[in-house]
Amino acid sequence: MRNTLSTPNLLAFPFRDEEIARIFSSAYLIEQMVNVELALAQVQAEHGLIPTEAGQAIAARASAAGVDEGRLLAGMERDGVPVRELVAQLREQVGEPHARFVHFGATTQDILDSALVLQIRASLAILEPRMQTVIANLARLADRHRLTVMPARTHGQQAVPISFGLKVAGWLTPLLRHRQRIAEIKPRVLTVQLGGAAGSLAPLEQHGAQIGAALAAKLGLGAPLMPWHTQRDSLAELAAWLSLVSGSLAKMAQDVILLAQSEVAELHESADPDRGGSSTMPQKNNPVVSEQIVAAARANASLLSSMYHALIQEHERGTHGWQLEWLTLPPMIELTAATLQKAVVLSGHLRVDAARMQENVERSNGLIFAEAVSFALSESLGAAVAKAIVAEACQVVEAEGRHLFDVVREKTDADVAWERLRESSAYMGASQAFIDRVVEAAAG
């Protein structure tokens, strides 16, 4: 008998994250919805809105373990949402005379939105440490290679010498902003939902705001200014953050792909010769981790527009925008988790070929120093003349394969410290200061 794969989609497997998949599983959602219902009954009993005995009975008898998922799925098919059937089953568990106090004053969206927020909180508890690991890995890499000279490339062509440490600092800095962003976003996203039928909590009369705050405290969430049934901006903001994180990781991955090209060969994803192998070409080590990061980031960027479409909601309860979030936000969270996990591997195992970087600097026949030579000449010849001489010399270098310094020295006897210019590390500007600032911020 052939073995069967447990994953439902072999090709999607590299983009899966089991921890996030568990959080967005039916079992976990049911558990969180029941947690919200139990917490609601508890705070209502504590505040005298339902009998104390009812609160005790609900806490003792209502359980996610007793929920029949088959019936829940049938209810989802019938009602479009699972909460009506869930409440019916919880009331059966509680029994009379207290069953009617389950879900007292709440509406379906209160339970589902609050459960979603609990899922998001659990997800961020996974995403944030992974991002911090990537930050720490890149900070060490930037510091280690602060003096490793390589060509900078603009528009795909060699530009001026930089250090690899500066490039890594450029990968790292957006993640520091994302770390700050999520700290600012979480208080807006991690808030309870309790508004009742139309956001007024009319069945709770004047106690609605108080019960909402108490429920938030019980669940360890924030209390919003008012129910946010059709105010979905915080979820869209979270989705944008997810796309930003994966996109920033993909910028790093795209650079790795380009630097791993055979003609460049300055980086390799790891020292493992068996990774990224080809079925027919034994020499290949394809940058598969980087490729997967880029693909996931592009998928997230596409999904993000759906979250913005979901902002368009009708009156006090939307018709379809809510469902659009169900289809979009969980995959975005899982894709981001997968890219972070892959970035942990990439940033921790990247193999840097410093000798090849220096070789590529020298291979330019001095053209990589054209800007430096132009500035050096301008001190005695003026900027316009200096630039014209160097531009003319560059054409000779391209045509004859000679070194830029030799060609320029034939065109002018201006006093220039040529040996100093040959030292790649001498033309690094404020690189060390920038690296210091980024590494210090990463540790903060």
Image: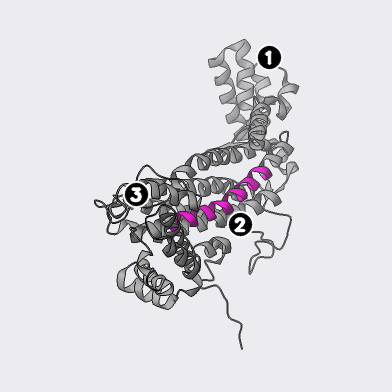
Tell me: residue 170, above or below residue 26: above
Disc 2 secondary structure class: helix
- Left or right, 193 with respect to 383, comes to left
Cβ–Cβ under 8 Å for marks 2 and 1:
no
Mark 3 or mark 2: which is in front? 3
Gap between marks 3 and 2 measured at Cα: 50 Å
Closest to the observer, 197 or 443: 197
Q: Along the polypeptide, which appears first: circle 2 or circle 1?
A: 2
Disc 1 secondary structure class: loop
Tell me: residue 36, above or below residue 11: above
Please, what is the three-letter code of the amino acid marked with disc 3?
Gly
Tell me: residue 347, above or below residue 395: below
Q: Residues within 10 Å of mark 2 (few under 14, many from 20)?
A: many
Magenta-colored stretch includes residue 364 = no
Give the extent of the magenta segment.
115-137
The residue shown at (63%, 58%) is 286
Closest to the observer, 423 or 76: 76
Specify the label residue 289 is tagged with: 2
Q: Along the polypeptide, which appears first: circle 3 or circle 2?
A: 3
Mark 2 or mark 1: which is in front? 2
The residue shown at (69%, 65%) is 282
Q: Residue furthest bottom?
A: 1
Q: Position of residue 261 (x, y in %)?
A: 62, 51
Q: Main secondary structure of the magenta part?
A: helix
Q: Position of residue 70 (x, y in %)?
A: 42, 78
The quadrant where residue 166 appears: top right
Magenta-colored stretch includes residue 128 = yes
Please, what is the three-letter code of the amino acid marked with disc 2?
Val
Q: Residues within 10 Å of mark 3 (few under 14, many from 20)?
A: some
Specify the label residue 413 is tagged with: 1
Give the residue at mark 3.
208
Please, what is the three-letter code of the amino acid marked with disc 1?
Asp
